[in-house]
């Protein structure tokens, strides 16, 4: 837990205040996140909140957040298997799940897998919770912050699959350091993924596609599974589409679906 305030922890108070669309409380929450940033040298670029939530969504957020959100204490490790009511066979991670369409579809298709989604955007987390409530999903937990903070708290070889789908491309050169697919994050994913585990990445941005390939191949711990463009321009059948991907298609942009495999350790 981030901290406590009387009987109830601080995050709980803040969520409650936020039910009244209290922008000040949200700012406090962000200040807490900033403190985490300072401690761990992490940073989220992009929006934390969009339109105010509808009352029903806010009520669902208040109801589910305490149970489903993962709290990361600086310097403490997390055993991802104990986050779920029933111990899953494997853990899969999605970084930047948007409103959770892909995460939820995968969770339904793989009930024995425990899913962890990371998304700092409040409206995205609220979208995920709406799906979880509607579809009665039990095998999803989330972290509402920079995925890196959570990844740093996970043990080696704890993940059997990871997804980064349509990460923000940060087009300007001076913003490249904001890209989620960075040498540091690739190294962390290499540490976390088991031998032969898949890392799936999609983008509709030509330059970012080349960047992603370069970052993964220079790391040396990954094999690129797709060997022909026909192969990586077609979304595999077990890869549900995402909200962002639909937007890209409507705008006439083709996407690349890249699958990397963590090489076996010696
Ligand atoms: C372009 S959107 C794509 C969302 C979704 N994957 C889709 O395809 O519809 C990129 C998402 O990544 C999230 N994001 C950005 N930086 C992140 C970080 N450091 N950790 C986790 N998520 C992040 C953003 O909040 C945003 O929702």
Image (cartoon, rainbow, N blue to C red):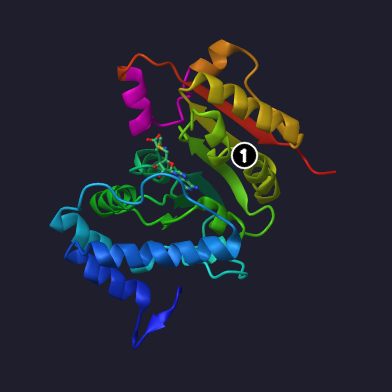
Q: Quadrant of the C terminus?
A: top right
Taking depth in this image into account, of 208 and 188 the one nearest to the observer is 208
Q: Residue at x 52, y 39 (%)?
A: 163
Q: How many marks?
A: 1
Residue 62 seen by the camera: no
- Return the residue at label 1: 182
Q: Quadrant of residue 242?
A: top left
Tell me residue 149's x, y (percent): 55, 58
| Quarter holding ligand 1 | top left
Does residue 260 appear to the left or right of 87 in the view shown?
Answer: right
Is 238 colored magenta in this rendering?
yes
Q: Quadrant of residue 243?
A: top left
Q: Residue at x 49, y 24 (%)?
A: 236
- List the single residue furthest toward the left: 55
Tell me residue 166's x, y (percent): 45, 32
SS at mark 1 in the image: loop
Is 230 colored magenta in this rendering?
no
Taking depth in this image into account, of 153 and 193 the one nearest to the observer is 153
Tell me residue 27's x, y (percent): 32, 63
- List the single residue furthest toward the front: 174
Cβ of mark 1 under 8 Å from ligand 1: the answer is: no
- How dense is the environment of label 1, judged by Cα within 10 Å: few (below 14), some, or many (20 and up)? some
Q: Report the magenta residues as a range.
A: 234-249
For residue 163, above or below residue 51: above
Q: Residue at x 51, y 65 (%)?
A: 36
Q: Residue at x 66, y 48 (%)?
A: 188
């Amino acid at each position: 837990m981030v901290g406590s305030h009387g009987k109830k922890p601080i995050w709980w108070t803040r969520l409650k205040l936020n039910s009244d669309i209290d922008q000040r409380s949200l700012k406090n929450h962000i200040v807490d996140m900033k403190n985490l940033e300072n401690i761990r040298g992490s940073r989220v670029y992009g929006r934390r909140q969009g339109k105010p939530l509808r009352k029903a969504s806010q009520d669902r957020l208040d109801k589910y957040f305490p149970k489903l959100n993962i709290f990361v204490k600086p310097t403490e490790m997390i055993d991802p298997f104990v986050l779920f009511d029933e111990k899953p066979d494997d853990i899969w991670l999605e970084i930047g799940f948007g409103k959770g369409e892909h995460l939820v579809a995968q969770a339904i298709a793989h009930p024995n897998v425990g899913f962890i989604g990371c998304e700092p955007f409040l409206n995205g987390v609220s979208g995920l919770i709406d799906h979880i409530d509607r579809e009665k999903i039990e095998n999803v937990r989330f972290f509402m912050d920079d995925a890196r903070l959570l990844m740093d708290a996970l043990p080696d070889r704890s993940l059997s699959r990871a997804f980064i789908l349509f990460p923000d491309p940060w087009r300007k050169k001076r913003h490249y350091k904001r890209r989620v697919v960075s040498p540091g994050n690739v190294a962390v994913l290499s540490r976390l993924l088991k031998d032969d585990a898949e890392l799936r990445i999609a983008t509709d941005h030509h330059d970012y596609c080349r960047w992603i390939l370069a970052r993964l191949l220079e790391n040396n711990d990954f094999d690129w599974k797709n060997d022909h463009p026909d192969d990586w321009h077609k979304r595999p059948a077990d890869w549900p589409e995402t909200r962002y991907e639909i937007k890209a298609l409507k705008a006439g942009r083709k996407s690349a679906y890249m699958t990397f495999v963590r090489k076996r350790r010696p």
